[in-house]
Amino acid sequence: MFDCKKRPFLLLFAFCCTLLVKAQISIHPNADPATLARIMTGYGVQVFNASFTGGKFAAGSFQNSGNNLLLDSGIVLTNGFAKSQAPGIGADGFSTQTASNDLSLPGDATLEGLINNLARTHDAAVLEFDFIPAGDTVDFKFVFGSEEYPQYNCTAFSDLFGFIIGGPGYPRGKNIALVPGTDVPVAINSINNGTPGPGGNISYCQLLGPGSPFRGYYVDNSNAAIVYNGMTKTLTAGAHVTPCSTYHLKLAIADLSDGLFDSGVFIKASSFNSTYARFEYTGNRDVNNRPFLVEGCNNGSLLKVLYSKKVQTPTEVRLTFAGTADNNTDLVNPLPVFVDFPLNDSVLSFPLSAIQDNIPEGLETLKIYVAPLICGNGFNTDSIEIDIKDFWPLTIQPAAPTVCPGGNIQFSVVEPGLNNFNWSPRYYLNSFTVSNPICTPADTITYTAVAEYSPGCRAQGNVFVALKDSASIRVTKKDIGCINNSGQIIVSPGGSWLQPQFSINGSPYIPDSVFNNLTAGTYIITVQDAGGCTARTTVTLVQLPALRLQASVIASANCNGQDGQIKITGNGGVPPYAFSTDGINYQPGNIFTVPAGNYTVYVKDNIDCSVSQAISVTPDPPITLVIGLTADSCRGLPDGSITIQASGGTGVYTYSLDGAPGQAANVFNVVAGNHSITTEDDRGCRHAQTVTVPLVNNLTVNAGNDTTICEGSSFAVRASSNASIFNWTPASGLNDPTLLNPVASPVMATTYTLQASSGLCSVQDDILVDIIASPVANAGPDAVVCKDQQAFLHGEANGLMTWHPVNLFSNPSLPDQTVWPAVTTTYWLEAVNEFGCVSLLPDSVRVTVLPDIHAFAGNDTVVAFGQPLQLVAGGNGNTYYWSPSTGLDDPFSATPVAILYSDMTYSLRVTNAAGCTDYDSIHIKAYQGPEIYVPSAFTPDHNGRNDLLRAIPAGLKTFNYFKIFNRWGQLVFSTNNASVGWDGKINNIAAPTGTFVWIAAGIDYSGKSIFRKGTVTLIR
């Protein structure tokens, strides 16, 4: 076959791909692992610890019928989409479409292990869970489908899937998705149409095992309602297990090599089963299909216990019981606790009937559970609930009848075969022992009928009888008011009066229950229903008294003209009344707030009769004010006053100042300024006015005389004022700008303004403080001299000068001075001008006395021929010179490197910053090296000569060690530092005169190891 949806050139032959109308599979995306595991699980297994990894829409549940997928429902796992959704096609697409969704998700290592990790997987969908089987086998049904059929038959690139079980007997896990009767895994290469795809080779299929590919299990899925090109027939995956043990099952599917062309595996719902026992009930069921028994009745009910296969070895299951009923006391034949299945059998039947205990118990329920005996309690493979009733239901006709007063009704029982009837209560019955008594009730009543099918097997039913009551008929009326013949009667029968008709004063019956246009008088109303029941009542209509109105003004309108009040009172007619000021808009309240004016007011009663009256509302006179003012003083206290005299308005006045709450007093003590006065009468009418209270200012101020001061000095101001608060501006240069007489220290000529205040008054005055510039002194640059040398100072100033400390100078006022400082010393120069102003800051000059140089060329040393030797100059200087320069890399460096082939004495000259110099020398003895020299004797007598025994390395890059041993071979001294020597002590005790053995080692500059040994004599 060819596939018109997989290759572009086949689009030219689109006519070959006819879209057929097929029964469509319905898939609901669901990646919840517990739900997926529950859907596929049937009997005999307990499933837990479920998990899922994969695409968000890669798994789901399905319902199916009428297509090549012969599974009606279950779950589906895919390496793409389970259900089609933008932008991809899912497993529910038509086979003429293509499901190829690259999700860019990881693969699965377990699947890769099935092919020895020869390729990588992608877009894996994995459902896995733990389970405990009740029996010794587990199995489930599945179908595998793929878009890679048939193009990738017998190639190395087909998608992978597997069902891997792990647990007892499967320590490494085993794939149980196998071709029936073989160990060949189910795959595209093991089940197909037998024809390799383009680029394929039959050998790839044959490699999977004998008989591969198995064409008999392949289904060509073209023109079907499942998207995959091909799929397998329904197959079974199964495994032998140990009952009641915990196993792990992993269901996985993935793309191989790339993420294109999806595959899916469908697993049948409730097909994951182990060997198990279950129940089957035959007998009575209620309207909700629940099994039930009736006490004392044997109707042939059976409970079957069925095993999932015929047993080949003795097999026993356990029954347990719960519920409100008891297996041992409520059943005629109690069910056994242990059920043994005979060999080659799988069904055991038990008759069920309930004991008649004559105890009214209501509905009881017996719950029965079955579990494999070997698994212990709690592993139930099935359960059933059976209700136990005291009676069979008994149906009485008519149900819930209604009877006319004085009438009767005859009952009948629907169920045949009953006898020994007993009706209760016995009131109003012509017989209480028959199936069809006649009832003539005097009131509403409920009857209970009990009968028997056989002795002890009873039926019971109830019937409610309603007596039609004439008291349930209600009548409302409207008496005659201002309009003649306006009476009305309305009849309302109770709900028991069906299809009622009505008559007034013996007139023919009509269905209308409302009678209009009646005059005053007495009327007889008769009600008759469809059953012929009748009832009568009498109604009297009267002529009502005439409606009257009384209106009054209870409040005139205030200055705003909006709060006048009219009160309207009604009497006569039919209350309640409604009131209006325009004859259109009515209200139940009888008081109206209105502006001043002329009005016509109305009253209307409950039957729409109305009367009117004219009335006028007058306004109040306006408020007027006479105001008196008293001036305020500077003290800042409310010394001024406002006095208000009001007239007009109504009632008592209140007075308010500047928005404050009103008061009864009409006098306010205030400060100077603008104030708002408001007067209000007792009806809220107001008059507002703004007044200005004057101020009297008697303050004086004198800031003092202008003055001149030296730069950097201060001046105490001498101002005068009778004010109490002061503020100088600017504040810069003042110690406190709020004082009357602050101290001024300006840095430049400044005019200060004094603002003097007291209370509400203020005045100001100015003073100028001029500045004379201070002289400037220059002590000259700092100097550096050697110890015991003189220094020359030169000063300059625009005025007289003085050197400090004055005790160090014979004439401190001269500009040129000669000093002989013993240590580093700082001198100061101060200047004074003709106005007596002193320089703000004295200038300083520092004479630094350098310390002695103390040149040091280093200790005399030895060196091997051609060995680089680092010289290090010491001393308090900043320039260095070595002579002669023979063998030196830089004679002007403090740390030159010398390479010698003969003895040499170098002279070192060190010069400091002041040009002072000092000298030292170093003698270097050159040897033909490399070598380690050790004296043959030493005298550790602490006289400063030959007290330490040292190893002297020459031409070594690294000095490893120097060790000394006594005559018994004991180590008495060891060091790896050539500058450290032995002081002739052993364990801090002076060793006696004697001979000792030494060894020394090091590495020369060529990397060669040097080892020397010898003896030395310690002489005391």
Image: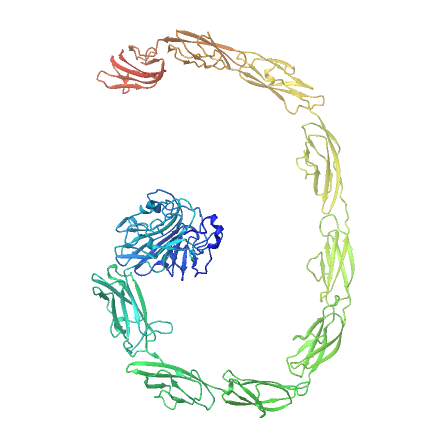
* In the displayed structure image, the side of residue 564 where residue 31 appears, left or right: left
Viewer-closest of 154 and 724: 154
Res. 694 in view: yes
How far from the left and from the top, in percent, is residue 674?
Answer: 75, 53
Which residue is more in the foreground, 373 or 315? Answer: 315
Left or right of 102 on screen, residue 647: right
Q: Position of residue 931 (x, y in %)?
A: 33, 12
Q: How is the image coloured?
A: rainbow
Disc count in the image?
0
Examine the rendered structure and indicate whether residue 569 appears above or below residue 964: below
Q: Is residue 733 above or below residue 844?
A: below
Q: Is residue 915 left or right of residue 223?
A: right
Towards the viewer: 763 or 263: 263
| Quadrant of the image occupied by residue 377 | bottom left
**Residue 255 image point, x, y percent:** 40, 47
The vertical placement of 279 against 7, above or below, is below
As displayed, is residue 26 above or below residue 281?
A: above
Q: Residue at x 27, y 71 (%)?
A: 327
Q: Position of residue 891 (x, y in %)?
A: 47, 11
